[in-house]
Image: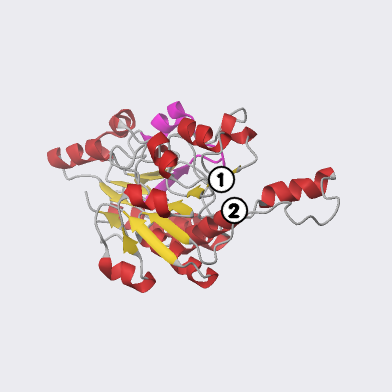
């Protein structure tokens, strides 16, 4: 009897245990993994992908034409442990689908929605109530007594909040904000979403109106050609001087040089970022010199439960795709 040929799977990083266990149980796959928490060097990624039938990658792995060429004709499935897919060369993947059986793409929507929304609200509160500054004052002796105007920030009660992108995560953020007594909720995007907005009594407005009227702005949109650089000098000039800006989407949505100028000049009050360009942000970046800018290392989905669920979904997407079965979460190309 001829031995069954195993399908080669390459995993670009250590992933949480539930996903690893699912791959380990796959008797029809030979799994090779980059055994590190740090990103895989490009040459090692090329070597790992050579001849692979399936790839499980992260949002920090740029899967471009060169890597797709390195994988060769065997490649059937790319499964990314992320909801965003801007790191995948989708146009190249589509081209290959036209000339052969195609490459299927799996991703992990929905499972990180609540965790990311929680982080967005946490970051918003941390920024508007100046918590990092307050903690530093305790540590450096700046806390000398109770002072009526010291460490005052901005509260959510009776405020206007603008959300750029009322998708799954945008809606979850709106839902989390309801108990804080937000008076008015605005949103913008490619088109009105009246059915989704009804729950929050949210108003669809132009980007200009949202910038001008919001006390707090949360960016939760996808990165597209239309949203790249959306939040730039013109956008920040339209904002209130007391407004707080938060981005949990993708760093490229924001022009960081323009954001720095807006913060340093007092054009806007403060900003909180969970995403930057590049990632990680260099430690000498000008934004890191500002007290009114809070920057986190892209930890929107960083709960143990969420990351485990993401890894399991990514593994199940990969295995289903390799076996020609329906994928739990397949990106329609």
**Cβ–Cβ under 8 Å for marks 1 and 2:** yes
21 part of magenta stretch: no
Q: Position of residue 131 (x, y in %)?
A: 67, 52
User: Residue drawn at (57%, 42%), measured in percent from left and top?
Assistant: 37
Query: For residue 43: magenta?
Result: yes
Of residues 209 and 321, the one drawn nearer to the viewer in this rendering: 209
CA distance for labels 1 and 2: 8 Å
Q: Give me the disc on residue 241.
A: none
Residue 269, disc:
1
- Image vertical order of residue 214 relative to residue 158, above or below: above
Question: Which is nearer the N-term, disc 1 or disc 2?
Answer: 2
Q: Residue at x 26, y 61 (%)?
A: 326
Residue 211 in view, yes or no: yes
User: Which residue is the site of mark 2?
Assistant: 128
Magenta span: 29-49
- 150 to 304, vertically: above or below: above
Foreground pick, 37 / 140: 140
Q: Nearer the viewer, residue 1 or 143?
A: 143
Q: Residues within 10 Å of mark 2 (few under 14, many from 20)?
A: many
Colour setup of the view: secondary structure
């Amino acid at each position: 009897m001829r031995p069954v040929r195993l399908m080669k799977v390459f995993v670009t990083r250590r992933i949480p245990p539930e996903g690893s266990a699912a791959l380990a149980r796959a008797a029809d796959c030979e799994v090779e993994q980059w055994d590190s928490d740090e990103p895989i060097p490009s040459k090692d990624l090329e070597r790992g992908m050579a001849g692979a039938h399936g790839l499980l990658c992260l949002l920090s792995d740029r899967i471009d034409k060169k890597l797709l060429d390195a994988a060769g004709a065997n490649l059937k499935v790319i499964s990314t442990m992320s909801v965003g897919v801007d790191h995948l060369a989708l146009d190249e993947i589509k081209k290959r689908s036209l000339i052969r059986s195609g490459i299927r793409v799996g991703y992990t929507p929905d499972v990180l929605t609540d965790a990311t929304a929680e982080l967005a609200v946490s970051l918003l509160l941390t920024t508007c109530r100046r918590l990092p500054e307050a903690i530093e004052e305790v540590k450096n002796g700046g806390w000398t007594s109770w002072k009526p105007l010291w460490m005052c920030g901005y509260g959510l009660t009776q405020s206007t909040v603008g959300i750029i992108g009322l998708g799954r995560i945008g809606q979850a953020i709106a839902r989390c904000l309801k108990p804080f007594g937000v008076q008015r909720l605005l949103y913008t995007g490619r088109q009105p979403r009246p059915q989704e907005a009804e729950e929050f009594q949210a108003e669809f407005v132009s980007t200009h109106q949202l910038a001008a009227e919001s006390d707090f702005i949360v960016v939760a949109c996808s990165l597209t050609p239309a949203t790249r650089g959306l939040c730039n000098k013109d956008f920040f000039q339209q904002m209130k001087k007391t407004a707080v800006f938060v981005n949990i989407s993708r760093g490229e949505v924001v022009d960081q040089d323009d954001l720095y100028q807006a913060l340093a000049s007092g054009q806007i009050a403060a900003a909180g970022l969970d995403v930057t360009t590049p990632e990680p942000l260099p430690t000498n970046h000008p934004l890191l010199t500002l007290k009114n800018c809070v920057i986190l290392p892209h930890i929107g989905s960083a709960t143990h439960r969420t990351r485990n669920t993401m890894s399991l979904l990514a593994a199940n997407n990969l295995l289903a795709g390799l076996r020609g079965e329906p994928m739990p979460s397949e990106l329609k190309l």
